[in-house]
Amino acid sequence: FAVVADEVKKLANETAQKTEEIEQRINEIQLATEESVAAVQEIIVNISDIDNAATQTAGAAEEQNSVLAEITRNISQVATASRQVSDVISNVQSGADQTSQASQMLKQSADDIVHLSDSLEGSVSAFLLKIRQSS
């Protein structure tokens, strides 16, 4: 029983460690996503400025304006998608946090089982000693 409890404890520790690694990677991905969103937003501002300057020119500038507007819409869609990815990553991180908490609870349970196993072993040994002494 103690061997099983020790194995459960080891598995709980490994799960907690892997959960922390996953959480760290998620944090790195989320940071990179946030930086990407900021860069895309800066690009949108820059393209908007270019669009305003192009509006002041004639002929070919009108065609360019149309193209830039399409690019702006596409970048805006990319920014929206990036925000959605960031939200999904936040949800995954929340799940990882919950998994970490569950792992910690599992580790505590394994520790409790080991303690109870040790206590039971001591009680059985004392009981057997009393039986032997009374024989």
Image (spheres, rainbow, N blue to C red):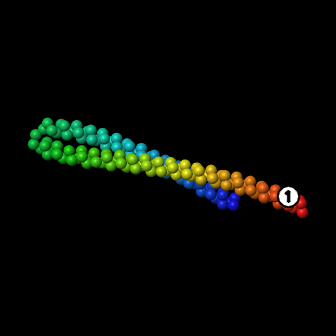
Residue to which mark 1 is pinned: 130
Closer to the camera, 122 or 77?
122
Q: In the rendering, at what x and y percent does residue 109 appear?
A: 63, 53
Closer to the camera, 5 or 71?
5
Q: Does residue 55 lie above or below 8 as drawn? A: above
Closer to the camera, 124 or 50?
124
Q: In the rendering, at what x and y percent does residue 118 appear?
A: 73, 55
Which residue is pictured at 53% across the width and 53% down the height?
Answer: 18
Which residue is pictured at 17% across the width and 43% down the height?
Answer: 65
Instruction: Judge left or right: residue 125 versus residue 82.
Output: right
Which residue is pictured at 37% across the width and 42% down the height?
Answer: 35
Q: Which part of the image, by quadrant, shows the C terminus?
A: bottom right
Quarter of the rendering containing residue 8: bottom right
Q: In the rendering, at what x and y percent does residue 95 appear?
A: 48, 51
Q: Which part of the image, by quadrant, shows the N terminus?
A: bottom right
Q: What amino acid type should be assigned to the residue bearing mark 1?
A: Lys
